[in-house]
Image (cartoon, coloured by chain):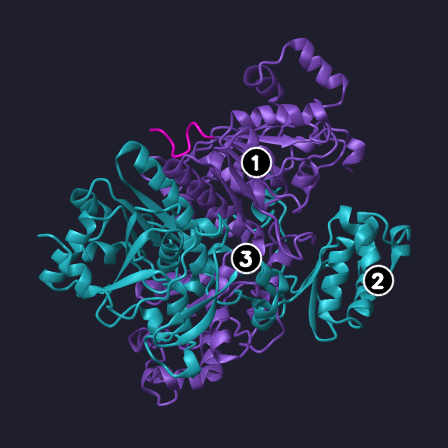
Chain colours: A cyan, B purple
């Protein structure tokens, strides 16, 4: 039995945020039906595609985000399909959607409407700004969310300007927050027998988590408009090495192990570096010495030296490194999934391990693959 | 209204950011969270508050700690002593959840691994959050937040267009693990409901974060191509970038996903002819001539404020957002209208604003019930009320160094 056995989820999600939330529900055992418009989720038109040949069935983005789901295509502009949707809503425990509030209302899937159809339903809405407020219906995407949350201002360099990080991290943050919040709502509903609306604002999730940025500004007025690129300080940052880059993150307690790992045991006693204050004061000098070390070592040697000495040193893993990682392999995190059109590929496994049988690996559905079977199963 | 986790007791053996943020969220949504620190081993964040050491009880005034530990109790217990371990196991027997984020081998060394805990309470949900996970050849490696995104594959695809891999401006792995923790615990509680048994959950922080770049792994395994960073641009659309605004270090983002949006942008820039210029008329043409297009937009964007551009473009249906600074996020009208910040008071630290529970659950909302605990603030509640120890027994704990009322500062500087 999986943690979410017996839960029925309806996903009216496009692109990344709601589909990631739905993927996690499916992975841990819920039955997830994905409702797609007749031309499919827009992530089907985004690459990268198998062999770089655009095909709505072989988008890596779609295939990854929709594992374990079934696909039903509905044209919600038609009365018949709208009625089909209502029948599906009556049979569901959870509905996940990521439309702008006005668009959700126009489609008839706003919470006020849904709760009348099914009072026990947990509705998870993921939007850029939340259901209410002056920007509630503003347009957004991953880039815009990075800007409006502050995560972008502090990333990158002074010269290069604000930078978002790779992939669709803002959208994923929305999906992950929605899954945690949605699961709390599921627990409350199973306890009380009454559903509710879970309102996720991506801006609200992303804005407060800028390390100590908000606490220091709010409590003490401390704030500097800085972007420090790859080197936050000499002992926290990304350094070049022979065949790539190395990352170090040394807290005060890690100084002796770090000094040993980089072959400079004498630094433990060296008064230029022996205390946190001294390391700060002589940061440039230390940085030069660390570069001297890093540029003469390979990434795997550095990673191993860190591991053996219990020093927080690793290297920048690219996708090839992940596929070859002895750690990920031994833990069984890398899952091979055979997709009927795209063939075999390697997918990340569960985000957290809950036992050998608690995560499902099934390929993403072909567009509308389950429409007939599911609509025929609806008892009128 | 009863919160989702009301009646759930959580033993919190976490420190710094990922773990404490996770258990704080459990507290925000109703759980009783008991944070356990040691007489000589506190949460490091107490020392990272940039508070002068001359302040009385400066370790209770670290804002970074106080934001991540509200809605918790604090008790002090030395788990390396027999008596401390014995009392901890008694707490285990009356608790529902245990969360820890030590390095992978620490709990085993303390003889508090899952098997030992399960023997005392088979219904416990035991969540471990180590960097690499509890198993595997690298499980003993030490990792902090910025290492997690390097291990996860994220840094390799982040950076300016065709530039070097670039780190996130903060320890991104930590809050992603913290955000995932309530889901993991909730799944555990549901499994308990279904099966009657507790569960061990191993959240390797690097794996949790690799799940947020999963499409790149699928792509590489199919196509054998490593993708370069693309900065703030998009593989399909243009314009899609961050542009300078008027004022120092002010920026705005603009993203046009359709021809109609682009035509409106040209009108607002008072250059309507650009919309039918063959260099920019179609999505493909704009993508091809993106450098030139970005220069044209930059010349215009510099003449306007960042919020001004955002509102003007949004009114026309064009995705745009000001690049907000920390002070701007705290005063942003949308964040204010959502009550994202709220004033609260702490007996030692005073009154200021902190973030509210981030997810709005209409029927069972989260709340800020308690300020972050002072060091040892709830010893009495835990020892007397929960464990039923007498005054004499509690005095003995102090004499033996099993607990403390104030930290041993020498071991924390």
Q: Residue at x 24, y 48 (%)?
A: A92
Q: Is B386 situated above or below B2?
A: above
Q: Which residue is mark 1?
A: B69
Q: Which structural element holds mark 3?
A: helix
The chain to which mark 3 is attached is B
Pointer 2 local density, CA inside 10 Å: few below 14, some 14–19, many at least 20: some
Q: Residues within 10 Å of mark 3 (few under 14, many from 20)?
A: many
The kind of secondary structure the magenta stretch mainly shows is loop
Tell me which residue sits at (80%, 64%) in the image: A290
How much space separates mark 3 and mark 1, taking CA atoms? 25 Å
Per the image, the residue denoted by label 2 is A285
Secondary structure at badge 2 equals: helix
- Earlier in the chain: of badge 3 and badge 1, it is 1
Q: Is residue A305 left or right of residue B320?
A: right
Q: Are marks 3 and 1 on the same chain?
A: yes
What kind of element bears circle 1?
loop
Can I make out residue A358 in this image?
Answer: yes
> Which mark lies nearer to you, 1 or 2?
1
Q: Nearer the viewer, residue A355 or B23?
A: A355
- Look at the image and say whether residue A318 sits in the magenta stretch: no
Residue at the outermost bottom position: B278
Residue B410: x %, y % from top left: 81, 33
Judging depth in this view, the residue of B58 and B8 nearest the camera is B8
Q: Which mark is residue B207?
A: 3
Tell me which corner region of the image, top left, top right, bottom left or bottom right, holds residue B93: top right
Boundaries of the magenta span: B1-8
Q: Nearer the viewer, mark 3 or mark 1?
A: 3
């Amino acid at each position: 039995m999986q943690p979410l056995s017996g839960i029925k989820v309806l996903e009216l999600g496009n692109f990344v945020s709601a589909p990631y939330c739905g993927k996690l529900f499916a992975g841990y055992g819920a039955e997830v039906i994905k409702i797609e418009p007749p031309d499919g989720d827009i992530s089907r038109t985004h690459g990268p595609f198998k062999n770089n040949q655009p095909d709505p069935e072989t988008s890596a983005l779609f295939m990854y985000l929709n594992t374990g789901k079934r696909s039903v295509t509905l044209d919600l502009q038609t009365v018949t399909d709208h009625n089909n949707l209502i029948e599906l809503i009556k049979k569901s425990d959870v509905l996940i959607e990521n439309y702008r509030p006005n668009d959700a209302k126009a489609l008839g899937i706003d919470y006020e409407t849904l709760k009348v159809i099914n009072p026990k339903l947990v509705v998870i809405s993921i939007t850029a700004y939340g259901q209410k407020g002056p920007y509630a219906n503003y347009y957004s995407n991953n880039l815009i969310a990075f800007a409006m949350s502050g995560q972008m201002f502090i990333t990158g360099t002074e010269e290069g300007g604000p930078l978002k990080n790779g992939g669709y991290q803002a959208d994923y943050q929305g999906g992950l927050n929605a899954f945690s919040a949605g699961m709390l709502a599921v627990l409350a509903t199973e306890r009380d027998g009454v559903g509710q609306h879970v309102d996720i604002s991506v801006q609200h999730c992303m804005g407060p988590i800028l390390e100590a940025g908000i606490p220091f500004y709010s409590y003490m007025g401390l704030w500097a408009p800085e972007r420090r690129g790859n080197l936050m300080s000499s002992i926290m940052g990304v350094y070049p090495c022979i065949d790539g880059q190395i990352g170090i993150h040394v807290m005060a307690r890690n100084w002796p192990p770090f000094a040993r790992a980089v072959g400079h045991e004498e630094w433990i006693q060296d008064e230029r570096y022996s205390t946190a204050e001294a390391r700060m004061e002589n940061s440039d000098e230390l940085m030069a010495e660390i570069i001297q070390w890093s540029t003469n070592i390979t990434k795997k040697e550095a990673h191993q030296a860190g591991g053996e000495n219990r020093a927080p040193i690793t290297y920048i893993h690219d996708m090839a490194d992940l596929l070859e990682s002895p750690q990920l392999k031994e833990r069984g995190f890398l899952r091979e999934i055979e997709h009927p059109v795209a063939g075999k590929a390697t997918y990340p496994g569960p985000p957290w391990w809950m036992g050998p049988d608690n995560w499902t690996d099934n390929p993403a559905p072909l567009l509308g693959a389950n429409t007939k079977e599911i609509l025929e199963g609806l008892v009128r | 209204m009863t919160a989702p986790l009301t009646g759930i007791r959580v033993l919190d053996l976490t420190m710094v950011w990922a773990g404490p943020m996770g258990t704080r969220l459990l507290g925000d949504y109703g759980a009783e969270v008991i944070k356990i620190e040691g007489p000589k081993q506190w949460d490091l964040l107490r020392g990272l508050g940039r508070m002068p050491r001359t302040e009385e009880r400066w370790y209770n005034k670290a804002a970074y700690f106080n934001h991540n530990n509200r809605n918790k109790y604090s008790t002090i217990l030395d788990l390396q002593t027999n008596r401390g371990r014995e009392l901890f196991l008694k707490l285990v027997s009356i608790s529902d959840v245990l969360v820890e984020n030590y390095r992978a081998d620490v709990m085993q060394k303390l003889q508090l691994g899952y098997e030992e805990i399960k023997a005392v309470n088979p219904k416990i949900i035991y969540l471990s959050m180590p960097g690499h996970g509890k198993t595997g050849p690298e499980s003993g490696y030490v990792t902090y937040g910025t290492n997690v995104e390097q291990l996860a594959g994220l840094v390799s695809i982040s950076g300016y267009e065709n530039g070097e891999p670039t780190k996130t401006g903060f320890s991104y792995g930590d809050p992603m693990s913290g955000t995932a923790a309530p889901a993991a615990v909730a799944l555990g509680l549901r499994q308990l409901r279904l099966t009657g048994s507790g569960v061990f959950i191993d959240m390797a922080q690097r794996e949790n974060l690799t799940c947020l770049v999963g499409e790149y792994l699928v792509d590489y395994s199919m196509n054998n191509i490593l993708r370069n960073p693309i900065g703030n641009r998009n593989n399909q659309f243009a314009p899609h970038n961050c542009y300078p605004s008027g004022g120092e270090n002010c920026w705005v983002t603009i993203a046009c996903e359709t021809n109609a949006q682009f035509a409106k942008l040209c009108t607002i820039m008072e250059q309507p002819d650009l919309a039918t210029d063959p260099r920019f008329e179609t999505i493909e043409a704009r993508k091809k001539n993106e450098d030139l297009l970005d220069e044209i937009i930059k010349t215009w964007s510099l003449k306007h404020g960042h919020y001004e551009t955002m509102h003007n473009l949004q009114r026309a249906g064009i995705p745009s957002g000001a690049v907000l600074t920390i002070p701007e996020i705290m005063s942003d009208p949308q964040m204010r209208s959502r009550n994202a910040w709220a004033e609260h008071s702490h007996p030692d630290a005073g009154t200021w604003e902190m973030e509210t529970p981030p997810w709005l659950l209409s029927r069972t909302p989260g709340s800020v019930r308690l300020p972050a605990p002072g060091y040892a603030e709830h010893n009495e509640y835990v020892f007397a009320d929960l464990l039923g120890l007498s005054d004499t027994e509690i005095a003995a704990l102090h004499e033996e160094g099993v607990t403390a009322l104030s930290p041993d500062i020498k071991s924390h500087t």
